[in-house]
């Protein structure tokens, strides 16, 4: 039998070369990083809750080179909560920080100027309470009279109070103990508290700390967590060009987290095997995007009423939360992402 003709060999060779070129292009698109622009590079200190999934757009903007593309050298500083990140910002240790809405409300009630430049993440089934079955915590109603660990001044406390209110339990019918988020699991395991409230990945850590003895209640019906990027008002308003660069990088980062879930989950390399499995199962329910929505203002006002009622601030009147939202930056780079009425 004769071999392939020279013409056929030429066709096959051309086809092989074409496939090789297409494969090379695909690999380049997958692994290439945006080249930094010419000119000076701007330093930016970002306080980030690096273990929280809501920080994915920031981690992606850093790891995928989107900050670098905008001429920003972002130095990420890791904190265990948005409250701690915001404190770093207010103390001048960071320029911007990732934070939920509650610490922004409490800062406003203390007359501290904090502004949100964008919301970057929303999730409903992300906050909850883990109770010890051997301490009689088996239903939400059984939390009455129990000691509950929580990080005061965070979304964890707000979600807990809202959850208790839904169960018609008064704040005085439980005893709160204040812990840093990464201390809650150990406190629960040692029996210092009967239950603990917080958010992922700390809820999973609490459940594993008391394996076989855990009851978990989620707060999706009472609190939908919003995660934001915020800074001190004076700094943000004095650096409009920087804010536009940051927002463009975050938009690219949020798109990466939404469109490339496997690669995005790899950003949380320190996650345990069980946490990695939880992230994979829950990822479809996460909303990554860079927005300033009217719902943010409504949430801030609801949370301010709660904080004022519980005397958590220095002022007893409702702040104007338009002052706590920086609209100019996102209106300049993605105007359709701004639905705040102003």
Image (cartoon, rainbow, N blue to C red):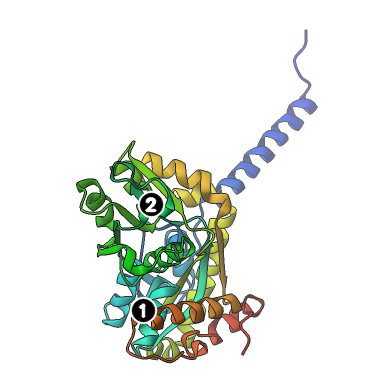
Q: Is residue 314 above or below residue 213?
A: below
Whole-percent x and y of residue 140?
A: 43, 53
Q: Nearer the viewer, residue 315 or 3?
A: 315
Of helix, strand and loop, which one carries label 2?
Answer: helix
Q: Position of residue 122 (x, y in %)?
A: 53, 64
**Residue tagged 1:** 310
Do we see residue 200 in this rendering? no
Q: Is residue 100 above or below residue 259?
A: below
Question: Does the residue at mark 1 contact the one at mark 2 (Cβ under 8 Å)?
Answer: no
The Cα atoms of the two marked residues, 1 and 2, are separated by 23 Å
Q: Nearer the viewer, mark 1 or mark 2?
A: 2
Q: Residue 261 at x, y = what percent?
A: 54, 50
Query: Nearer the N terminus, badge 1 or badge 2?
Result: 2
Asked where in the image residue 296 lies, by quadrant, the reply is bottom right
Residue in view at x 34 percent, y 82 percent: 311
Q: In this image, 67 relative to 151: left or right?
A: right
Report the side of 178 relative to 154 (left or right). left
Q: Nearer the viewer, residue 45 or 143?
A: 143
Residue 250's x, y, as percent? Answer: 51, 69
The residue under label 2 is: 142
Decide: is 101 above or below 237: above
Which quarter shows the N terminus? Answer: top right
Does residue 74 appear to the left or right of 257 in the view shown?
left
Q: Which residue corresponds to the image point at 32% horizontal and 38% vertical from the top-left?
A: 211
Dot 1: what SS? loop
């Amino acid at each position: 039998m004769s071999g392939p003709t020279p013409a056929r060999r030429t066709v096959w060779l051309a086809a092989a070369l074409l496939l090789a070129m297409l494969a090379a292009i695909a690999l380049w698109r997958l692994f290439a990083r945006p080249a930094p622009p010419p000119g000076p590079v701007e330093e930016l200190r970002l306080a980030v809750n690096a273990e929280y999934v809501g920080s994915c757009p920031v981690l992606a903007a850093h790891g995928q080179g989107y900050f670098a593309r905008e001429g920003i050298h972002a130095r990420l500083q890791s904190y265990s909560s948005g409250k701690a990140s915001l404190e770093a910002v207010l103390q001048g240790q960071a320029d911007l920080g990732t934070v939920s809405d509650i610490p922004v409300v409490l800062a406003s009630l203390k007359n501290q100027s904090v502004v949100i430049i964008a919301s970057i993440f929303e999730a409903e089934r992300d906050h909850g309470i883990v109770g010890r079955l051997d301490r009689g915590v088996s239903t939400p109603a059984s939390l009455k009279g129990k000691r509950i660990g929580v990080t005061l001044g965070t979304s964890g406390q707000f979600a807990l109070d809202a959850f208790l209110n839904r169960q018609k339990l008064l704040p005085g019918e439980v005893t709160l103990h204040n812990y840093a988020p990464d201390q809650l699991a150990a406190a629960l395991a040692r029996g210092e508290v009967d239950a603990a409230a917080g958010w992922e990945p700390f809820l999973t850590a609490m459940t594993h700390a008391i394996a076989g003895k855990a009851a978990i209640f989620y707060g999706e019906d009472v609190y939908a967590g919003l995660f934001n990027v915020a800074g001190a008002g004076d700094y943000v308003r004095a650096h409009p060009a920087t804010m536009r660069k940051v927002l463009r990088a975050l938009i690219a980062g949020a798109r990466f987290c939404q469109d490339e879930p496997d690669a995005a989950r790899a950003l949380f390399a320190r996650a345990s095997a069980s946490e990695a499995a939880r992230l994979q199962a829950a990822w479809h329910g996460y909303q990554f995007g860079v927005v300033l929505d009217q719902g943010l203002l409504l949430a801030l006002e609801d949370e301010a009423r709660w904080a004022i009622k519980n005397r958590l601030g220095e002022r007893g009147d409702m702040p104007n939360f338009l002052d706590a939202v920086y609209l100019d930056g996102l209106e300049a780079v993605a105007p359709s992402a701004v639905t705040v009425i102003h």
